[in-house]
Image (tube, rainbow, N blue to C red):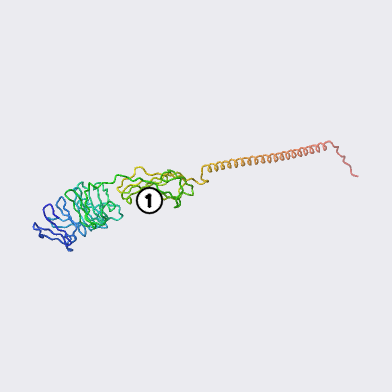
Amino acid sequence: MRTRDGAHWVLTRAGLYLLGPDLRVRRHWQHDPRDPRSLGDNTVFALAEDRAGILWLGTDNGLDRFDRGEGVFTHFRHDEADPDSMRNSRVYDLLYSSRGELWLGTASGLHRMEGGARPAFRFMPVSNARVATPIGAILEDLQGRVWVSTTDGISRLEPGSGVFKHYTAKDGLPGGSYFVGSAARGPDGQLHFGGVNGLSSFLPDGIRDNPYPPLVRITDFLVANKPHPLPGPVGSIGQITLSHRESAFSLEFAGLHYAAPASNRYSYRLEGFDEAWVDTDATKRFASYTNLDPGNYVFRVRASNKDGVWSEAPAALTITVTPPWWKTWWFRLLATALLASLGVAAYRLRVRALVQQKGMLERQVGARTAELVLQKDAAERRKREAEQLGEAADQDGATSPCCPISAGA
């Protein structure tokens, strides 16, 4: 590599070399375990020069900042305790972009260095893989977009938004892994990446997304994993009515787009049940639902092509699950009327019983009152009779003559 001052630098597995104008070695740097300011590792993969003339080295043991004036190396490595560190210390390639950003291609993905004296290394995804793939090489096109080669294709990244697009053999690449550091940009802006299956060369502006979205269709309807008899094709009938015993069903769908159909993606939702859209890929083109409550539902599904262009109008199917007879409106109305009638009848019976009880009590009270009146009258009569007898006795005593006193013989 040649820096702006005309110096030639050679990166090897035995350290860093500086060549003179005659291409002879003028200086050699190697790792010294006893000197923490020496080169971080003898295996040097990449070199980049920033606007200040500082050299950045990608090694097998981290990123090194080389101050040529002082001859000092500063090391940046992966640190489990530091979330701002790079994810892997093996740095395969470096790019100092036109935006003044340093990009690192590591064994665990792409990173962008941010910050000043104590920089942070931000991980930048370039594919949908669960585990970040190793980065082989990094290039910048004339529009400022970043392109990287990986073990699974080539990716394009928009530095401002972080939006990426990943290309594989399904998009026309030769497939297979790409070599570390094997990349170059030509004078015409053409990018070249070397891999195990050959050289991949292209003009970035010539790569365009497919603008045509798939035509999505619902292809099958199954109940209990068996085809359900329908009056016509499921994609054209628009509505299905099921009994409560058929509330477990599945729907299959497809996106009619044949440019890399295995890369099509789908999103579906059962309105009335799913709170949000459910995303899936071409390996799972079906949706299953079990034990749905009686009611009306609308299943909608949409599809996108390999470039993420989504269909404008999703396919839709209205599904009605009828309730069992004991949950129908007429049964509930009849049951309500029956309960109301029973309530009224019970109320009337209760009122009648209370009236009868009241009448019985009134009769008992009347009879007892009459009995008391009779007893009172009899007592008063006996009292009067006694008084009359007493008065008669008094009168008889007053009218009788007194007996003479006889003299004793």
In this view, the residue in front, 166 or 173, is 173
> How many dots with numbers?
1
The quadrant of the rendering that contains the N terminus is bottom left
Please tell me whether residue 38 is drawn above or below residue 263 in the rendered image: below
Residue 326 % position (x, y): 52, 46
In this view, the residue in front, 260 or 119, is 260
Could you tell me the amino acid type at mark 1? Arg
Name the residue tied to disc 1.
Answer: 285
Answer with left or right where residue 141 lies relative to residue 333: left
For residue 372, which quarter of the picture?
top right
Residue at (89, 44) in percent of width and height: 408
Answer with left or right where residue 9 lies relative to residue 251: left
For residue 386, which quarter of the picture?
top right
Residue 280 % position (x, y): 35, 50
Residue 43 % position (x, y): 19, 61
Answer with left or right where residue 320 lies relative to residue 376: left
In this view, the residue in front, 171 or 304, is 171
For the question of whether residue 201 can be seen, the reply is yes
Residue 196 % position (x, y): 24, 58
For residue 316, which quarter of the picture?
top left
Give the structural element (helix, strand or loop) at label 1: loop
The quadrant of the rendering that contains the C terminus is top right
Residue at (34, 46) in percent of width and height: 214
How many residues crowd mark 1 within 10 Å: few (<14), some (14–19), many (20+)?
Answer: some
